[in-house]
Amino acid sequence: MKLGLKLAGALAGAALFASLFSTTAAFASARSDPAPALNQVRVCSLPVPGYAACDSVQLLNPKVNWHGQSGLNEAARSKPSPLTVPSGYYPGDLQSAYGLAGYASKFGSSETVVIVDAYNDPYALKDLAYYRSYFNGKSGSVAGTPTTSIPPICGTPGASGAPSCVHFTVYNQNGSTTSHPRNNVSWSEEISLDLDMVSAICPNCNIALVEASSASFSNLAKAVDFAKTLSPVAISNSYGGSEFSSETSSNGTYSGSSSMAITVSAGDSGYGVEFPAASPGVTAVGGTTLNYSIKNGVPSWSQSVWSGSGSGCSAYEPAPSWQASGWDVACSNRTVADTASDANPNTGVAVYDTYGQGGWLVFGGTSVASPTVSSVYALAKGYDASAGVSFSASPSLLYGSSDSQLTNVVSGANGSCGTYLCNASPTLSPSLMPAYDGPTGNGTVAGLSGLGPF
């Protein structure tokens, strides 16, 4: 289909980055990156050393492939089909699946979620405004899901006279709102996906988009450093690349705080670890397959490990204190992931994007999961304030045994490693943390609580 990153320019700079990163097993024996299923396509091409790729996967022909229907010939599965109405999960579906329907309309209005991506999406505001307008007042695609209230973007048509609106601002990596990187079709899809997921989970949140000049780790790190100056509740990073020996030098950039979460996609190539998801200070977000059944007119949701979710033991990053050696019996370093959310393209989400695309698309990948979890942090901060309890964005609290607001994922695998690093718990998980596994961490969001970050 398309190539997301313009590799000509990337390859020209590869020699420079090779001099910065040691030639170690991280590059010399890079893990296998299996291609997506026949009915799917990576949004961004695989990166060269020193660069990241966006972690999103497009579902081709959603009319045919939604929820992975079988018995289709190759031509039917691989032929894209434009959508005039959205397929994939809607905001109401996601709020229902993660127990957020009672919170999404109440909280988040004082919070900002920052999206960090590469390159520029010239239609970001227009497409985001349309997505929010379309789903405002609509229930999900699944029977029994709630109607969502999604305020307009301030300054857009329909915002005048509205009881509330949310602010949306686009910056470059240096903080300018008037100068932008060059346009890129594939990263524009990633940007639309990220912005739409914040709107779906935390519709009252203000949103900032920080666009790096390129997909190099150097420029993306500069974008994250600027994003921190905006004092957001969370910064979402839906990208990654192979680990490298000097990655630990960027851990200061990719470190959240008690008041600010940094979420990172765990990757879309199955068992194996990406950077910056491996950084000890982030919330690394893996992927699930999100299914439902209808019982008495109400959806019952279930999740299993998505086979494409990244996970494993970092080659270079030390374990954070909450993953200290002795707890993790299969890995003495940082283990990925910490939590998870829907990421299977066959159970993917509706996204609106018109820059080089026709409008409604369906995406999966852990790029869905990272902004989802960032937005949950924003809701949780508002909830905790209303409940009179202290909010913390530290991923350490995801490991608290008293946190009942996570649903353990008990089936599926993303590889054949033979341990909990690629298998769902509880079958092969460490004895001290029976609910933990690599692909989904300590589980998926199940409402909000003052006992932890969710």
Image (tube, helix red, strand yellow):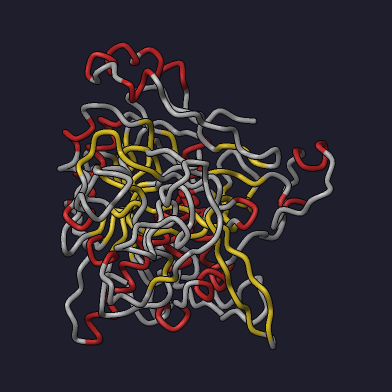
Q: Residue at x 28, y 65 (%)?
A: 399
In the image, is 364 to the left or to the right of 437?
right
Query: How many numbered marks appear?
Result: 0
Quadrant for the N terminus in the image? top right
Residue 407 versus residue 342 in the image, above or below? below
The residue drawn where x is 56% and y is 81% is 146
Residue 129 drawn above or below residue 406: above
Q: Report the front residue among 185 and 298.
A: 298
Figure quadrant of residue 453: bottom left
Which is nearer the eye, 187 or 23? 23
Residue 110, by quadrant, is bottom left
Quadrant containing the C terminus is: bottom left
Residue depicted at x 33% and y 15%: 13
Estimate the x, y position of residue 301 in percent, counting from the top left.
58, 73
Q: Nearer the viewer, residue 37 or 207?
A: 37
What is the x, y in percent for residue 449?
31, 79
Q: Quadrant of residue 381?
A: bottom left
Q: Is residue 396 above or below residue 211?
A: below
Q: Residue at x 26, y 45 (%)?
A: 334
- Image coords of residue 209 (percent x, y): 34, 50
Q: Position of residue 10 (x, y in %)?
A: 40, 19
Please identify the residue farthest to the front as the structure is shown: 431
The answer to whether residue 376 is left or right of residue 224 is right
